[in-house]
Image (cartoon, helix red, strand yellow):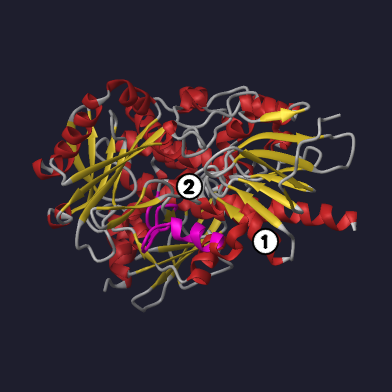
């Protein structure tokens, strides 16, 4: 039996994590009259959505786009009066391949047309296979064991003859997962693609995952949800211990650092853990860990991604007939997008350093930053190498996220431990975009997971009364 | 605006190239579908069938129940059939739209891109 701890606050449900998933769960519960407390480790809400003012602009250091079929995210924006606008796409994109610059139009670099055709065929094969993997239970897919015993790289060995086509697909995968094809279970990859409408959808601007942005940044949506929940959202209060006794229905007690100093304990009937799997595993669990969930979390590392913003006095690339998009086979940047404000009054390029390139970037220190500037110059001309400011957001350094954009599953994880992803353990329920069945890894998925966790908790509370 | 004759001529060229392309034959294997082309700039659309790994000839008008509806301007269709236009540009700008099941839309999107790339 767990030792008694002094209780500072009692409530019906305690939510760990004030990102999109935790706030979505808490808001749904609060709207049903449930007494809920949200403990957020950081001094802000939003989690992997984080908008900051840089040089008078609101820049998203984390998740920033909204695409078609992301209906929860759109409803939330509508409700809060946050407008969206299309990602700038007019003009040609730039490809850097083997140190040579090409421009192209459309979805995929066309310089090596047969290789591009190879890549398009492979993406179709992957996307059609993904539709066969059930998003609510990938482990129930036909042949789940074999698919989960293969990496995406293994699949590419069998399906892609040309090294250029392989490169094209690897760049796309690097951007989407923050990981290399060698790191990804094929079963997990297919699940993820199905949840987001296919790789062809995830790499797209217009018509896809990067279609629109929020005027003023995505974090406003988290702030809006938190405002509704009010002072029951406690910032600066990282949870350290979760206590529950699964043999007795006596709720859950979490002990967190108190804003400022010391610690406090919140006791609730139910808890929602709205954090990445690896972050849940870093907590102390008393008297024992949620074993299968913890084991699964050990097989779900965070991706590796750093987001870079380069600020200019204006989006000069537009006048050169370019849309600000870059695809590069060698780092540091594997992709960029035009991230200028809606009025186009200033120029901003947002770039992603991901997977292999990000690991190298972290080792290279200042030389890595210099390489980013050189690469921008090669892609968009000498002016691009001299931004007014360069912002670098390293998600792997974030104590309460651990990487980005999402946790991935290594081979063998989902087929052996998958059901533990969402299965409640005693009074503990699981949210977080990793637990979503629609748009896993995206803001939309976070909202869906929070709503699902809230529904589970309401069921459980209803059964009690 | 392209005339029906111009469209038919361009399509015949596209069809010949597509039916002779081993990669495209593989990509439409087992995918028997009815595709309607709707002209956004007016005029009678047309129907194409994919059957047994081959594209049919173009039939004027909207014939049968479509699995996929492709909507665009006659000029863009002409350019696309001649291989002068990357269809993914037009999908991304929304000037050509595809409607149908997710799998069918994915397939026609990829097929038309490969037809452009793999000339």
Residue at x 59%, y 55% (from the top left corner): A233
| Quadrant of image for the C terminus of chain A | bottom right
Label 2 is found on which chain of the structure?
A
Mark 2 nearby-residue class (10 Å; few <14, some 14–19, many ≥20): few
Residue B27, image x, y percentages:
48, 42
The residue indicated by pointer 1 is A28
Q: Nearer the viewer, residue A25 or B11?
A: A25
The numbered mark, 1 or 2, whose residue comes first in the sequence reads 1
Quadrant of the image occupied by residue A447? bottom right
Residue at x 71%, y 55% (from the top left corner): A454
**In the displayed image of the protein, which residue is found farthest to the bottom?**
B42
Verify whether residue A182 appears in magenta.
no
Residue A162 shows up from this direction: no
Mark 1 nearby-residue class (10 Å; few <14, some 14–19, many ≥20): many
Residue B73, image x, y percentages:
33, 69
Residue A426, image x, y percentages:
81, 39
Label 1 is found on which chain of the structure?
A
Tell if the residue under mark 1 belongs to the same chain as the one under mark 2: yes
Residue A432, image x, y percentages:
60, 45
Q: Nearer the viewer, residue A68 or A280?
A: A280
Q: CA distance from mark 1 to mark 2?
A: 23 Å
Specify start and end residues of the magenta stretch as a single range. Answer: A204-226
Tell me the tag on residue A43: 2
> Callout 1: helix, strand or loop?
helix
Disc count in the image? 2
């Amino acid at each position: 039996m767990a030792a008694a701890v002094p209780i500072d606050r009692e409530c019906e449900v305690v939510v760990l994590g004030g990102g999109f998933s935790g706030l979505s769960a808490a808001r749904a519960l609060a709207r049903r009259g449930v007494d809920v407390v949200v403990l957020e480790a950081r001094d802000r809400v939003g989690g992997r959505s984080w908008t900051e003012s840089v040089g008078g602009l609101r820049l998203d250091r984390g998740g920033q786009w909204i695409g078609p079929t992301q209906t929860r995210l759109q409803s939330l924006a509508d409700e809060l009066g946050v407008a969206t606008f299309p990602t700038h796409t007019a003009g040609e994109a730039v490809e850097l391949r083997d140190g040579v610059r090409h421009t192209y139009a459309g979805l995929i670099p066309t310089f090596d047309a047969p290789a591009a055709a190879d890549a398009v065929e492979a993406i179709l094969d992957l996307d059609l296979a993904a539709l066969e993997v059930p998003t609510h239970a990938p482990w129930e897919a036909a042949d789940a064991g074999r698919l989960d015993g293969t990496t995406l790289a293994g699949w590419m060995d069998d399906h892609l003859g040309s090294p250029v086509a392989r490169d094209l697909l690897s760049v796309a995968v690097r951007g989407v997962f923050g990981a290399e094809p060698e790191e990804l279970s094929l079963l997990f990859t297919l699940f993820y693609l199905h949840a987001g409408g296919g790789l062809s959808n995830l790499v797209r601007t217009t018509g896809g995952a990067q279609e629109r942005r929020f005027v003023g940044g995505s974090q406003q949506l988290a702030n809006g949800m938190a405002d509704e929940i009010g002072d029951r959202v406690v910032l600066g209060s990282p949870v350290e211990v979760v206590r529950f006794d699964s043999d007795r229905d006596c709720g859950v007690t979490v002990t967190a650092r108190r804003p400022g100093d010391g610690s406090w304990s919140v006791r609730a009937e139910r808890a929602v853990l709205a954090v990445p799997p690896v972050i849940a595993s870093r907590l102390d669990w008393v008297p024992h860990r949620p074993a299968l969930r913890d084991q699964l979390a050990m097989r779900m590392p965070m991706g590796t991604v750093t987001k870079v913003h380069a600020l200019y006095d204006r989006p000069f690339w537009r006048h050169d007939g370019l849309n600000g998009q870059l695809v590069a086979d060698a780092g540091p940047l594997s992709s960029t997008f035009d991230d200028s404000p809606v009025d186009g009054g200033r120029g901003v390029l947002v770039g992603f350093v991901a997977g292999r390139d990000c690991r190298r970037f972290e080792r290279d220190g200042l030389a890595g930053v210099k390489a980013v500037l050189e690469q921008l110059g090669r892609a968009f001309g000498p002016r691009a190498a001299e931004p007014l400011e360069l912002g670098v957001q390293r998600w792997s350094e974030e104590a309460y996220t651990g990487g980005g954009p999402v946790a991935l599953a290594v081979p063998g994880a989902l087929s052996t431990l998958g059901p533990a992803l969402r299965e409640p353990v005693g009074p503990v329920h699981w949210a977080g975009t990793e637990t979503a069945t629609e748009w896993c890894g995206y803001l939309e998925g976070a909202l869906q997971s929070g709503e699902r966790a809230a529904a589970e908790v309401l069921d459980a509370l209803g059964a009690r009364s | 605006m392209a005339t029906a004759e111009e469209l038919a001529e361009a399509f015949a060229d596209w069809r010949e190239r597509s039916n002779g392309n081993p990669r495209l034959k593989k990509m439409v294997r087992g995918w028997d579908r009815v595709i309607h082309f709707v002209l956004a700039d007016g005029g009678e659309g047309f129907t194409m069938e994919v059957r047994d790994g081959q594209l049919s000839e173009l039939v004027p008008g909207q014939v049968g129940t479509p699995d996929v509806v492709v909507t665009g301007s006659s000029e863009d269709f002409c350019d696309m059939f001649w291989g002068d236009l990357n269809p993914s540009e037009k999908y991304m700008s929304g000037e050509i739209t595809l409607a149908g099941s997710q799998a069918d839309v994915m397939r026609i999107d990829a097929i038309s891109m490969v037809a452009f790339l793999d000339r």
